[in-house]
Amino acid sequence: MRKGTDVPRKGALKNSKARQVDNTPVVLTPGTFYTSPGLGIGKRGVDLLKCYQGEYANDQRNGRGVYKYANGYATYEGEYKNGVKHGQGTLTFKDGSFYEGEFVDGEIQGRGTRRFNNGNRYVGDFEMGEMHGQGTLTFKNRDRYEGQMMRNKMHGEGILYKENGDVYRGEFHEHRISGQGTMSYANGDRYKGAWKDGKRCGKGMCKFANNNRYSGFWENDTFNGRGTLNIPKQGIWYDGQFVDGKPVQTPTKLNIFWWVCYRFVWDLPCNCLCCKARQTVHATRVGD
């Protein structure tokens, strides 16, 4: 190039013919663009598939711009600072997924929205490109999780709203319901206690919609171990061992109790429920 013209930066095609008219950008063939730093806006790159188009300052990408990656898999549109993605931006992938939100020093960092190609959607905190912190993860099947995330997984305290109407509040571990928590079922049942890998496991209490209650140990989502089952409508109270949801022992002793109110004691007319017999069946081990 003649004296006084701008020299193309490293990366311009070698042995390419160039021309310059006044202050217009130098155009290098074939299809490679170079912009003089003083002009502020332009394109640069080895080819159009991985070029940057946007604002420059101090010979670096600064301001807003668009960058298409060489492999064609992603396009970034947003803010730059000192040559790297920094500020608000959108990273769109070829498969239709995208991230929209904050970038810090070239990394996905801060608050943002991530839409996956399987239909899942996350809104919340990110750290080094991963879902990490507080956020809301909505699944394709319309289940929704609100709570703590760790390295792209539900982990810590959170709430899971299931599409079928069940609601779980409690602890999660490695993307599964594990730890202590409460599940309110759509059918009216309510369980509070220990969980493992999405199932009731350990010590817990469940009040069923029909007013039956079980308190004790669970395994694989059913009664297993020592527990107490109360069936008020039948006046039954079983306290003993369970295996796969069934009592191990048969009742060996009956204790019948009668509760009455003062009106009954004094032989006064009364139709209250207190004056009706209530019995409790207490099961104990043979020999107890």
Image: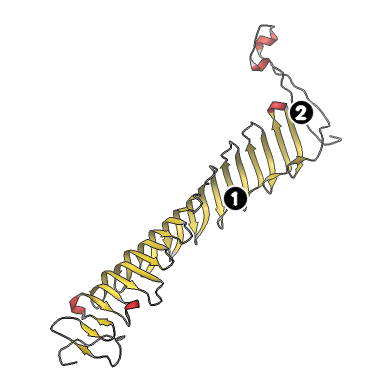
Return the mark for residue 281.
2
Residue nearer the viewer, 23 or 254: 23
Q: Position of residue 47 (x, y in %)?
A: 32, 81
Q: Is residue 188 left or right of residue 98?
A: right
Q: Residue at x 44, y 54 (%)?
A: 134
In the rendered image, the vertical position of residue 33 relative to residue 216, given as above or below? below
Secondary structure under tag 2 reads strand
Q: Position of residue 14 (x, y in %)?
A: 30, 91
Sort mark 1 into few (<14), some (14-19) or many (20+) by Cα contacts within 10 Å. many
Secondary structure under tag 1 reads strand
In the rendered image, the vertical position of residue 11 relative to residue 74, given as above or below? below
Locate the C terminus and report the quarter of the image it occupies. top right
Q: Residue at x 59, y 47 (%)?
A: 180
In the rendered image, the vertical position of residue 31 relative to residue 244, given as above or below? below
Q: Residue at x 70, y 32 (%)?
A: 230
Q: Is residue 37 left or right of residue 90?
A: left
Sort mark 2 into few (<14), some (14-19) or many (20+) by Cα contacts within 10 Å. many
Q: Residue furthest right?
A: 287
In the rendered image, the vertical position of residue 39 relative to residue 183, given as above or below? below
Residue nearer the viewer, 274 or 33: 33
Which amino acid type is marked by label 2?
A: Val
Q: CA distance from mark 1 to mark 2?
A: 33 Å
Q: Which image quarter: residue 13?
A: bottom left
Return the mark for residue 259.
none
Q: Earlier in the sequence, mark 1 or mark 2?
A: 1
Q: Position of residue 273 (x, y in %)?
A: 65, 17
Number of dots carrying numbers: 2
Q: Residue at x 56, y 39 (%)?
A: 186
* Image coloring type: secondary structure
Q: Position of residue 185 (x, y in %)?
A: 57, 40
Return the mark for residue 179.
1
